[in-house]
Image (tube, rainbow, N blue to C red):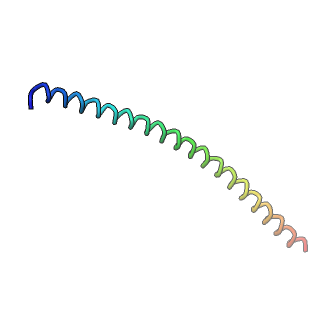
Amino acid sequence: MSAGERALNAVKTIFTLKEQVDGLGRDIAAMNTRVSRLAEAHGELRDRVSRLEGIIEGAAMAARQRRIEE
């Protein structure tokens, strides 16, 4: 293999690695977006569960109050 062929292979390798690194950058950006959406969805679900817990606790308190009155 001549020096020119080795240099050409090195340049090809560098471009291939650059393409792979660029692809990883895009993948990381996409994952970041997905994680952000997941965090938002988690917060929304947490709020919904909290509201449901409040409703359940309120119903339980009302049921206890009715039993005390009876």
Taking the view exactly as shown, the residue that stands out farthest to the bottom is 70
Q: Residue at x 29, y 33 (%)?
A: 16
Q: Is residue 21 left or right of residue 32?
A: left
Q: Is residue 11 left or right of residue 54?
A: left
> In the image, is residue 50 above or below residue 18?
below
Q: Residue at x 48, y 42 (%)?
A: 31
> In the image, is residue 55 above or below residue 40?
below
Q: Is residue 64 left or right of residue 1?
A: right
Q: Position of residue 46 (x, y in %)?
A: 64, 51
Q: Position of residue 37 (x, y in %)?
A: 57, 43
Taking the view exactly as shown, the residue that stands out farthest to the right is 70
Q: Nearer the viewer, residue 11 or 2?
A: 2
Q: Is residue 22 left or right of residue 11?
A: right
Q: Position of residue 15 (x, y in %)?
A: 28, 30
Q: Residue at x 78, y 66 (%)?
A: 60
- Quadrant in which the C terminus appears: bottom right
**Quarter of the rendering containing residue 26:** top left
